[in-house]
Image (cartoon, rainbow, N blue to C red):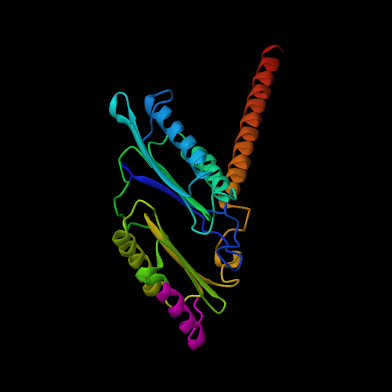
Amino acid sequence: MFATKLVLFIAVASLLGTFSSAAVDTFIYGGCSQAKYFPGSPYESNVNSLLTSFVSSASLYTYNNFTLNGISGDISSVYGLYQCRGDLSSGSGDCARCVARAVSRLGSLCAMACGGALQLEGCFVKYDNTTFLGVEDKTVVVRRCGPPVGYNSDELTRRDSVVGYLAASSGGSYRVGVSGNLQGVAQCTGDLSATECQDCLMEAIGRLRSDCGGAAWGDVYLAKCYARYSARGGHSRANGYGGSRNNDDDEIEKTLAIIVGLIAGVTLLVVFLSFMAKSCERGKGGK
């Protein structure tokens, strides 16, 4: 929950058959508040400390949240959390590597922003100047559905089985369901109670059923939880998703670099033509 309007960037990526086999640093979405803080301000110092704490803590814990209170009061206070996907462990280093990657990308994507959030395939990080910790938030961030599979009783039965398991309240905060070649994953952030988690997941799963009922795959990300299902090979570039490791944010950076290069080239051309025109005028004046 950002205090100001959120600018969202989405690039839901290929799952390469199963969610667990996809690159943990694959970009899913990112968003930044429009409000900015001043360079060198106490808030900037707290944000940097918070993001550093994420990386340090991720080597020991797969979830943690932090509150840094500013010496000048609430104006410089910052709140944040990180969370790794349930099948990633801190001991293997996978969680810490994912969080470090997410923090690096968030720092670039949301430079000087008072709030920011970024979801990778394997982890999620978020910070804001207004507390959101322990607050249930079912705002829809991403909703994507694959192509329709038509009426196939076997496919529909497997999908219903997987989604039904994800909806089971006994599944915990991280849930994986498998039926045949279909796999589903659901998770909520660690700051929610068991009741809030179930409520959030039921909202996400309900949207999967209603919006992606006959689709080959579906992804629904809410602000505090997500639910997804996919058949092997169900996500692909042809379906509008990015590649496995060639993430959309990298493509954006490349595109921006090309645009900057073109602008620089045009600028140099204009300067050169202006110089030549002035030279011609001086030549005419000297005759």
Q: Residue at x 54, y 53 (%)?
A: 89
Reply yes or no: does residue 256 show up in magenta.
Answer: no
Q: Is residue 122 above or below residue 58?
A: below
Q: Residue at x 32, y 41 (%)?
A: 4
Give residue 234's quadrant in the image.
Answer: bottom right
Total tally of numbered discs in the picture: 0
Q: Position of residue 11 (x, y in %)?
A: 51, 55
Q: Position of residue 84 (x, y in %)?
A: 49, 52
Q: Which residues are magenta?
A: 147-165
Question: Residue placed farthest to the top in the image?
Answer: 286
Q: Position of residue 32 (x, y in %)?
A: 41, 43
The answer to whether residue 144 is visible is: no
Q: Is residue 225 above or below residue 168?
A: above
Relative side of 54 to 199, left or right? right
Q: Relative to the observer, which residue lies in front, 2 or 238? A: 2
Relative side of 255 to 74, left or right? right
The answer to whether residue 217 is visible is: yes
Give residue 68's quadrant in the image.
Answer: top left
Q: Position of residue 95 (x, y in %)?
A: 54, 49
Q: Relative to the observer, which residue lies in front, 251 or 104? A: 104
Q: Relative to the observer, which residue lies in front, 79 or 150? A: 79
Q: Magenta part mainly helix, strand or loop?
A: helix
Relative side of 89 to 165, left or right? right
Q: Is residue 182 above or below residue 157?
A: above
Reply yes or no: does residue 153 show up in magenta.
Answer: yes
Quadrant of the image containing the C terminus? top right
